[in-house]
Image: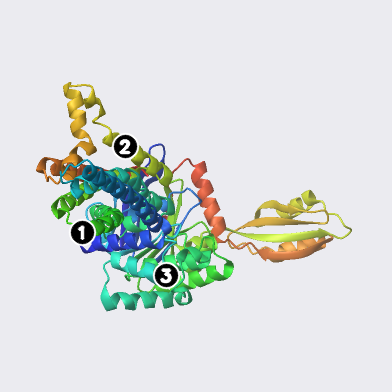
Amino acid sequence: MRNVWIILRNELRRYFVSPVAYVLLTGFGAFFALVFWNALGFFVNRGMEMQLSGQSFPISVNEEIIRPMLSTAGFVGLFAIPLITMRLFAEEKRSGTIELLATSPVRDAEIIIGKWLAAMTVYGSILLFPALDFAFLFRYGSPDWKPIVIGYIGLMLQAGALLAIGTFISTLSRNQIIAAFVTFVACLSLWILDWPAGYETATWARVLSYMSVRVHFESFTKGVLDSKDAIYYVTLIFLGLFFTSRSMESLRWRS
Amino acid sequence: MITVKELTKKYARNTAVDNISFEVRKGQIVGFLGPNGAGKTTTMRVLTCFLPPTSGSAAVAGFDVLEQPLEVKRRIGYLPESPPLYPEMATTEYLTFVGQLKGLSGADLRKRVDAVCDRCAIADVKTKLLGRLSKGYRQRVGLAQAIIHNPAVLILDEPTAGLDPKQINETRELIRKLGGDHTIILSTHILSEVEQTCEQAIIINKGKLVATDSVHNLQNRARGAESVLVEVAGRNGAVDSATVQQRLAQISGVTVVHIKEKRDSRAIFEVETRKGGLVRGDLARAVVESGWDLNELRPAARSLEEVFLQLVGDESQAGGAAASGQKQ
């Protein structure tokens, strides 16, 4: 456990002394601000229209602002995740520091989990921006907080799965750009696996749809914590990290 | 301290290390010698548990590298060929991280960081980023990283590569000083380095063990004969080297005369004699009496370099029969 903490802290320090973390934070911070501003614009407009037409249906802040923001945050992960994971192992392989880690009295699993947790922390810090936006909603209104918490759990679970896959892909190359691009394609493919289910009802389409990360995320945005979806993500995290450890081991046998 | 038994490491297409065995006793400094691509780095990587052996075994302080890698890693300090530095970290920050990885913490860790900074003469760059350090400093931070947890065994892969002559001397001095309490294996393809720093040499070539012996013995290992270098000059500008060679060969006790170097007015001959044949006086007399000038007459020192080239050369000619130095 102590070793995981040492690796995690070192990774975080290196994320935050290099410009990577700041560029990501600034970029996504600005992006979420834009999304929030637009969502708020629609919401206000819609509210006024309803009042003018004499309808008195209450429109929900959760439905109109928070839910689309959470979906957007999930989608944005597709772009952020490859940028976060690309350096995890590729950089260490290129600079030779992997030899330091591999010859220190630390288990492979501790290195992998430490690095993955560091990636989770960086992604989590990106998610602070929508949280900041939501804080304004609480200041001027009274949205339901439970769907937000569940949405965040979903975001972290989904990101955990994709980050685990990215971590694995980062062990395959010593080139960060290749690692980032392959991770992006992999995440995007997992994202769109449910498309065939739109026109096909055969079993294979339903199986593919079940394997899509997006399908499992939907319930979380609705504020529903479904154990089936959580198990899907946890399984994916476990698989990704397991493949990473296999890959690290095979690095030693092949190199 | 280190036991390597019939170690073989095969890669997909070639065999990097082929059935080598050796032992290193506690406190020894051993030079691991061989041309580039001989298998030095691979052997070291097996010893540090970075690579698993294909067959055979390696053990450090009684722990097998495959069965108890964590115990081995705890006892080893390793400096790879290029020091494993994070360019975006400062020196003390980096050394602290490595110390933590090796299991140090608290006041003990701070003390060790200061100690290795002093020992490796990097105290003046403590707060500098590693990426900004010069090659010499980077190498020394690499060495500091290897000794931070005061390991029983130090494995240094070409510790002086890329340093300037002054830094090379300083590094060798440092390694010699470390020799007392650490067992050290250092690889190099520079022979004088082994002559200066090591007590024991392990020579490998093309993955095979060529010789293991003390440096002293290796230096003394002559071809069972003595050789003398003679420089002869013609008095009137030119010298007929063939005639001189013939004349020298006639002297009793001389076995072979090679022409080593030939210029217009002078030539250098390497004269091999039977052991104990004191022929230098006869050589001088023969040269002078034949009307040539004797410019120089000196014993050909058999440096480790020649022994090495001879061993490595024999090895490739003999097609791989491993000659163990222990026989002599």
Question: Which residue bears the numbered disc 3?
Answer: B91
Label 3 to label 2: alpha-carbon separation:
40 Å
| Label 2, residues with CA under 10 Å away: few <14, some 14-19, many ≥20 | some
Q: Nearer the viewer, mark 3 or mark 2?
A: 2
Q: Is residue A62 above or below residue B233?
A: above
Is residue B154 in view from this perspective?
Answer: yes
Question: Which residue bears the numbered disc 2?
Answer: A188
What residue is drawn where x is 23% and y is 30%? Answer: A194
| Label 3, residues with CA under 10 Å away: few <14, some 14-19, many ≥20 | many
- Mark 2 element type: helix
Amino acid at pointer 3: Thr
User: Measured from the top left, where is residue B3 in percent x and y?
Assistant: 31, 57
Is residue B55 in view from this perspective?
Answer: no
The one of B237 and A231 positioned closer to us in this rendering: A231
- Identify the chain of the residue marked 1, using the numbered disc in the image: A
- Locate residue B293: give its quadrant: bottom right
Q: Quadrant of the N terminus of chain B?
A: bottom left
Question: Which residue bears the numbered disc 1?
Answer: A138
Q: Quadrant of the C terminus of chain B?
A: bottom left
